[in-house]
Amino acid sequence: MKHTRVTICGKVQGVNYRHSAKQEADRLGVKGFIKNETNGDVYLEIEGEEEQLNKMIRWCRIGPAKSRVSEIYFNDGETKNFSAFDIQN
């Protein structure tokens, strides 16, 4: 089990990014959360097997159809044992 923190920059708010990410996380079996940041970025923390996290990060680089991802940053963190993938406000 791995834990990864991800920040997505670009046109990622107001384009259904968080809800689409939840659908993808649920499909992949990834746990964690996603939220909008005040600076316009989207931030998420995800946990799962390395292959699941890699697939989720690849999805984050593209996002939903109306999004335009300009940059993505990620790094490993300490496992928190999330029980689901949630959207936070």
Image (spheres, helix red, strand yellow):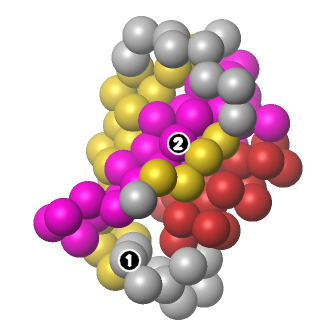
Neighbour tally class for label 1: few under 14, some 14-19, many 20 plus, Cα within 10 Å: some
Q: Is residue 53 visible?
A: no
What residue span does the magenta drawing correspond to? 29-58
- From this view, report whether residue 79 is shown above or below residue 34: above
Q: Report whether 64 appears left or right of 12.
A: right
Distance from disc 1 to disc 2, alpha carbons, whole Å, reads 15 Å
Q: Which mark is residue 33?
A: 2
Residue that mark 1 sits on: 13
- From this view, report whether residue 14 is shown above or below residue 22: below
Question: Which residue sits furthest bottom?
Answer: 66
Q: Report whether 75 appears left or right of 81.
A: left
Name the residue located 61 percent from the left edge and 23 percent from the top edge: 82
- Which quarter of the rendering shows the N terminus? top right
Name the residue located 79 percent from the left edge and 47 percent from the top edge: 26
Asked whether 42 falls inside the magenta stretch, the response is: yes
Q: Is residue 64 visible?
A: yes
Q: Position of residue 39 (x, y in %)?
A: 15, 66
Neighbour tally class for label 2: few under 14, some 14-19, many 20 plus, Cα within 10 Å: many
Q: Which one is earlier in the sequence, the residue at label 1 or at label 2? A: 1
Name the residue located 47 percent from the left edge and 52 percent from the top edge: 88
Identity of the amino acid at label 1?
A: Gln
